[in-house]
Every structure is written in C-alpha cells, then in structure tokens.
Image (cartoon, coloured by chain):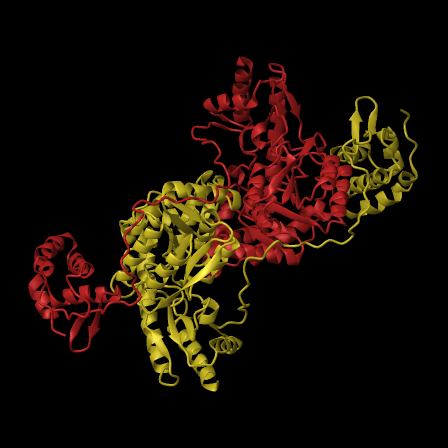
Chain colours: A yellow, B red
Amino acid sequence: MRSAPLPGTLSALPTTARRAGTRAGGRARWGSIAEALRRALASGTLQPGQLLPSTRDLAATYGVHRQTVMVALDSLCAEGWLRAEARRGYRVLPPDPALPATERRRRPSFRFRPARAASVAPPALDGVRFPLHAATPDPRLLPRAELRAAYAHVLARDPGPLDHDDVWGNAALERELRGYLQRVRGLSVERILLTNGSQEAIALVARVLLAPGDAVAVEDPGYAPAWQAFRAAGAEVVPVPVDDRGLRVDELAALLRRRRVRLVYVTPNHQYPTTVTLAAPRRRALLDCTLAAGVPILEDDYDHEYHFRGVPQPALAAREQAPHVLYVASLSKLVAPGVRVGMLCGPLDILEAMAQERRASVRAGDAVTQAALADWIADGGFERHVRRAKRVYAERREAALATLARASQRVPLRVAAPDGGLAIWCEWPAHSVLDLARRALARGVAVLPGPLAALEAPSQGLRLAYGRVTPRVFAEGVAILVAEARRS
Amino acid sequence: MRSAPLPGTLSALPTTARRAGTRAGGRARWGSIAEALRRALASGTLQPGQLLPSTRDLAATYGVHRQTVMVALDSLCAEGWLRAEARRGYRVLPPDPALPATERRRRPSFRFRPARAASVAPPALDGVRFPLHAATPDPRLLPRAELRAAYAHVLARDPGPLDHDDVWGNAALERELRGYLQRVRGLSVERILLTNGSQEAIALVARVLLAPGDAVAVEDPGYAPAWQAFRAAGAEVVPVPVDDRGLRVDELAALLRRRRVRLVYVTPNHQYPTTVTLAAPRRRALLDCTLAAGVPILEDDYDHEYHFRGVPQPALAAREQAPHVLYVASLSKLVAPGVRVGMLCGPLDILEAMAQERRASVRAGDAVTQAALADWIADGGFERHVRRAKRVYAERREAALATLARASQRVPLRVAAPDGGLAIWCEWPAHSVLDLARRALARGVAVLPGPLAALEAPSQGLRLAYGRVTPRVFAEGVAILVAEARRS
C-alpha cells in the first residue's frame, strides 16, 4: 500500500497547530494535531488501510518536534484509529467488520421515560428558623473531640477501613452493636445487617419479602417513608388505626382474617408520629394474632432509649414466641441524622437473603464512619453520650410540655404527653392543620402536620419535635403557631 | 370498686424481690416487683378495674421503701397495665376494647419465605495472600494525614455535616465533583446525584427505567454486579459480544433491530473485565444506533483517569448528540474501596426521578465522609493523589507486563496489554480457567476467572489485577498460577 499524500485537511493543519500551541505548550500542540487527524479519519479523508507519511515529514509539515507528532499518533492508536507497524510507520486501520451500516437517526430528540417514581419530595425548608418538624437528635450535643479522635484513630490504620466494602458492614461495629442491643435493650441477636439508616433496612425487607400486589398492614397515622418503600416494591399499604394505647390490634386481627397480608409494619415503642407507646396487653395480642396468621412483623424501634417514663418495654423481637419478628433500629435517630447506620436483625437465613439483595443494590456503606463508630462504642463514648443526651431531652421535654400548657390557655389545644420519643403530638382547633402548618412555614416555623402522615385517619394533629432545638426556640415557634391558630 | 386483697402471686413476692435486690440495688428491686405484678396482670390474677392496695401496704408487704413501689407502679402505668387515680391510688385498666379475642396459634413454628434473592455471594477470600482479583485502587497510597485533617476539619463545624441527610448528597461535594468532571474529563453536567458507589447508581437506573420483563443489552464478558441490579429489577440481561476493540456494535445494532431493548449498559473506557478501550469509530456508531432506536445508554466510566496510553477518550456522555446517555462514575474505584461515593449524571428530570427512588430506598449516604471529601477535593488533595497514584500504577503495570512476558516463556499465555485500567486480561491454556483459579485460591492467589464474568462468551481468560499489590506480590502470585497451569 502506498504512502498517503498529505490530504487537504492535513495541509491546513500547521496554522491550527500553531494557534493551539500558544495555549499550553506541548500538550496542546500534540492535542490539536491529533484532533485534526481525527477529523480527517472520521470524515474519510484518510482512508482505511492507508499508510501515513513518515513522522519526520509530518513533523516538518506541522513545524513541531518529531516527538510531538509521535505522541499524537500514539494517542490515535490507543483510540482505535491507527496502528503502528514495525519499520513502516502508522497505518489507518482496515474497516472494522463489527461496525454496523450507518443509520439515520429516526429520533433526533430523545426523552427518558421513567417506569415509576417512588416518592414525593418534601417541601423545601430554606429559611426555617424554628425547625420543629424533625424528631431527630441534636448533633450539637455530640462530643466532637471524641468523634474526631475516633476518626483519626481509624484513619491511622494502614490500610484500615479504606480497603473494605463489606456487604454486611464493618465487623467490629456489628459486634459492638450486638453487645449494645443485648446490654441496653435486652435483645439477643445472632447477627446484624448494617444498612444506610433504617430506610435501607425497610426497603430491603420490602424488596425481599414482598411481591407486586401484596398487602402490608401499617399504622395510620404512620411513617410515610416506610410506606414509600413498600409501594416501591409494588405492595399495597393497608391502614390500621391507632388510638391512645397504640395500634388497634383488634382491627389488625380482623384485617388478617379478611385478607391475605404479607407483612405488618409497626413502631411499638414510640409510635410514629403520635409517640404513643403500645400498651403491654396489646403487644402480646399483636404477637399472637400475627403468628397465628403466619404473617411476619417488621418492628421499627428507631429511638428506643429516648423514653422518659419508667424503662422502655422490651422490644417485640426480644420476646419468646417472636420467631416472625424482624427488627430495625438506627443510629441516625440516636446520634445524628448524618450518621447513616441502620441495623436489621432477624433469623440468619432471611438476613442472608437481605444481604444478597443489598449486594446488588448498594453493596456497602461508608467504611470509615463505621470503623470510627465501632471505636467510639468500644470506648464507652456512645453510651455515655446517649445517657447525657437523654437528660437534655428530658429537660427539653418538660419545658416543651410547660410551653404547650401555657399555649393551651390561649387556644384549646389537646396535648398527649408522651412517655418517650423526641416529639409531642397535639391536636389543634384549626379548620385545617395543613393550612396552619403552611402559614407557620411562611413565618419560619416547620412542623409535621398529621395529614401528611395519614392514609385514612382524620387528623387535627401536629407533631412538634422538641429534641433538636433549645426550649427557647421551641417556645418561640409555638408562639407563632398559636398566633396563626387564633387568626384562623 | 373495692381495693384488692393481695393475690397469691403478690404474697409470694417479697422473697423474689429480696433475692433480686441483692443484684443491683434499687433498680433491680423495683424491676422485680414490677415483673411479679406484670405476671399477675397478664395471667388475670389481678382483674381489670381492680384497685391495688395502697403503696404503703405494698411497701410493707415487699419490705421496700414506698418510693421503690411507686417506681414499679409508674412503670406499669407507662406500659399500659395500670392508671394512677388522684387520691385513690393505682387501678388496673378496664378491658381494652381494641384487644382481639385470644387466638390459638395455628402455626407454632414460622419460616420466612423470601420472594427472591438477588445475587450470589462471592467465594470467601480468607487466607488470600496474593489478592489479584480486585481491580481496585491501593488505599496504602492515600495521603492519610491529609484525609485526617479533612475529617477533623469538618467534624469541628457545629453542627456541620452531622445534621444532614440530604437525598442528593452533600452539596459542596457535588459542586467539587462537577468541577472535577469538567476539568479532568471534559464533561459538563448540570447536577450529580451522589450515591453509595456505582452499584447504587446502577440499581437506581434499573429500578426507575426498567419494568419486569424488559431487556437490557450488556457486554459479554461484562460486569456481573450490574447484571444483578438489572435482574433485581425484573429485567432480562441480553449479551452482546466484545472483541479486541470493545463492544461488537454491529451485533448490538442487529439486536436492537430484532427486539425491544430498554437499556444498553457499557464500560467503554476500560471494558470490564477485559480493560479493552472501545475504539473511536465504534463509539460514534454506538451512539448513532442507540439514538436511532430510542434506547438509552448507561455509561459506566469507573476508573477513567487510570489510563496509561495517550489521554483517555472523552466519555460518550461528553459528546454532542448524546442526549440519551446516563453517566455513572465512582470514587471507590479512584480512591479506595471503602470510600462509597458514586456519581450519577443525566438530564435533570430523570435525575429527579432517581432521587425520589433513592429517598424511598436509601435516603442518604454518609454525611461526614462526603463533607471531608469535599474539603479534600477543594484543597487540591484529591487531584494530587490521583496523579501520584497513576504514576505508581503505571510502574506496577510495566512490572506486571514484564512478569507476564517472562511467564509466557513457561506457559503459552496470551496477554492483552491494556491501555488503561488496573488489571490485565490474559488467556491461559488450562483446560478450565475456573479450575485453575480454584487451585490457585487454595494456594492463596485470588484472581477473577473469565467465566464468572461471562454470560455466553466462551472464556479462557483470567483477569489479573495489579493496582493494589506491589510488583513483588504480583510476581509471586503469577509464579503460583504458572506452576498450577503447568501441572494441569
């Protein structure tokens, strides 16, 4: 095959190369030579099989060093345009038999069509000065020096956690949390699957246990993010009412007799959003009627320790006769929202199935944070912090109840003093608490209006979270709510 | 209602209480009184509506301070057994109308039945001394002091990242990564959805774009964890062959004409597992035939920068005429396996749908690590590290190729010298590379055998990862492989 004359495109090159060369020296110059050759190759000016002029000739043509030309040509070899042949030079690759005939685009524009969207974004909370909407812990209470030391400690290990992406999570953290659940919650578990907060745990349970069309019984009002996870798995969410002793177990039992339910999701310790504790006699009945029907329970015990009257009741999963209970807990609800460590407990074989689902969907959580938390728990820092934080929350709870007692002299509030949880549920006389919440938001006060957490339950309730704000901020927020409620 | 006489259970109590009292003082003593009363309540010895004896009488009966009795009784109130009545004392709650009639357990035993299991666990790798199986970066190369400083810095902020669980991920990190993609990969994106590594990004795309029964075209051999994510969404994975210039685009085009395909998943920069770079002419053809068919592409550009010949070609997503390309990248493949930060890029409306899916399935990743990485990137540490690591990998690659050249004098190896990626694909003369891999594993050498990454493609290939081991460890591992191959 003969050596190619410089095609038209190539003759025009030196100008381009010189102009580009003023930008950034060698790299820009070889880059612009490569680009011009690339265009000649793509347009067919340089033909398959054709041998290029010698690098010496090309260098002279472009007015650059021969080395610069060779860098450009080697780059085009790497891209699959040329190949280098010993003692001959660079040749344009023969036509690729694996290239399809050129197709005309029938569809010059393109639109993605999602098969589904699983949830609805919450309202934006920019400009909120009184964040009473989230019953989350207050990260300002955290012992930052302890946490810094724990992170520094694990980052000093070589290679340490940075080399790990275990599906089950950090083994040391898993061990520490097993000890914690045993010591503090009286719950013996064989193993914990660590997840990205409780949300991932709930979603894994949903995807592994549920098939499209399955029914899941949930508390109403209840935890809407869990409903989203069940619905994302194609399941239907069926409401069971809640009263001042928690889930109406009689209604659940009737539902289980009436139709095939595949899962019961409950928050017995501090019902979300009302914070009511499920009464002890109902717990036994709940376990009995679900076991009799062969329906598993998913127990979400998200902030067990933040209980202020007596000791928290043992988890359902801690009972005998609870072989059908899966248990989920979370450090994001005990420590800080940014600490995305959830725990999923249950029989080993079903946890294995969840781990396989996790391998395909997330693979692993953050290795550094998990290792640092393991150190912090082992050193006793975590339990110290939870005890200390609980004292602060107990004070904030008293102050919040006093604030609401004063407020109820101005508007006829009904306040349910909670035994636990970081929020207080109260009923407002406003025509619509949704409207009240919207007007409060406009004045910088964010709250959770009951209807956003309800399926069928009528609700005049607002949930006011006191855990993450000072008593003064809480009182100022409530004052604005009261003013708005009186205006309506 | 009359005051109850002490039932039989109660008369028997003092012994129990005293015995328990020796354990841990006050707490244990009130706890055991509460437990005895609880049993009396559960068994019906104490009847609904019944008034309990006075706390003074109970204290005398149990031989404890009155305060101890009151703690026990208050705890039982909290559990939903009793209520306190002003000036009367404690009364057993009346029967709960929401309790169902007691049900006999038809099913004393219970078994969880998973609706599906999504993936298969890889073999255990305990005792592996020569880890040539994972083409991941070497975390020993990381500048630990810089990382420690970044973590310490963000943990000093109050409340800082610990207060965040944003679905989209840390905003500062997102901004830094957008800048990085623009600067280093020439890719302009409006927004990045941050995920837990590339696996979550792929799984989100699968769950949002695919419906059960949909077909996804994938490279064969290819990246099995992506197949698992597609299958978990109910999709069918359809193989398209790969040759020494990458994906056979002609075969893909024929497939698109033959049947309805909903997604094409490709690794064009360094094909997984062969590390072949998709030739430039095929890239244009790939974009054309998919756009003509209206089928979106998911481009996985997992370790773009680790390219050692010329500069990496621009991503498909960086081209004009690529409105149908979603782009996924990952820091776990650039920095360390334990850094679980993936990136998903695409048109804003489809990213919104992915974010909603994420809200229901994972909610957020680790806030502390994300904030620390944002600082590290902003300070230039990340890019410095990638440049430095790339030089080390380039040396290890040369050494690995030299090792394999020597090895090929003892067994007839075919080595494909890669332009990039942290692994080398080579074909072994063994009857079965699966068997060879198994025997090597027994001697402490882990490799990826081709058949584990193949759907239909016949494969004598082994992928040998050189990035995370020293040249000496690589050479020792290869020596064991050669010895085993010669024995077969």
**Residue B103 placed where, x, y %?**
28, 55
**Residue B58 placed where, x, y %?**
10, 66
User: From where the camera sits, is residue B350 visible?
Assistant: yes
Direction front: furthest residue: A258
User: From where the camera sits, is residue A448 visible?
Assistant: no
Give me the residue at 26% from left, 63% from top: B79
Give me the residue at 51% from left, 56% from top: A231
**Residue A311 placed where, x, y %?**
25, 61
Judge whether B348 appears above or below B445 on screen: below
Quadrant holding the C terminus of chain B: top right
Quarter where residue A41 is shown: top right
Q: Is residue B188 left or right of residue B93?
A: right
Q: Is residue A352 left or right of residue B213?
A: left
Q: How many marks?
A: 0
Q: Is residue B273 left or right of residue A136?
A: right
Judge whether A483 appears above or below A328 on screen: below
Along the viewing direction, whichever of A324 and A29 lies nearer the viewer: A324
Quarter where residue B421 is shown: top right
Along the viewing direction, whichever of A485 and B387 lies nearer the viewer: A485
Quadrant holding the N terminus of chain B: bottom left
**Residue B90 placed where, x, y %?**
17, 71
Judge whether B375 appears above or below B226 on screen: below
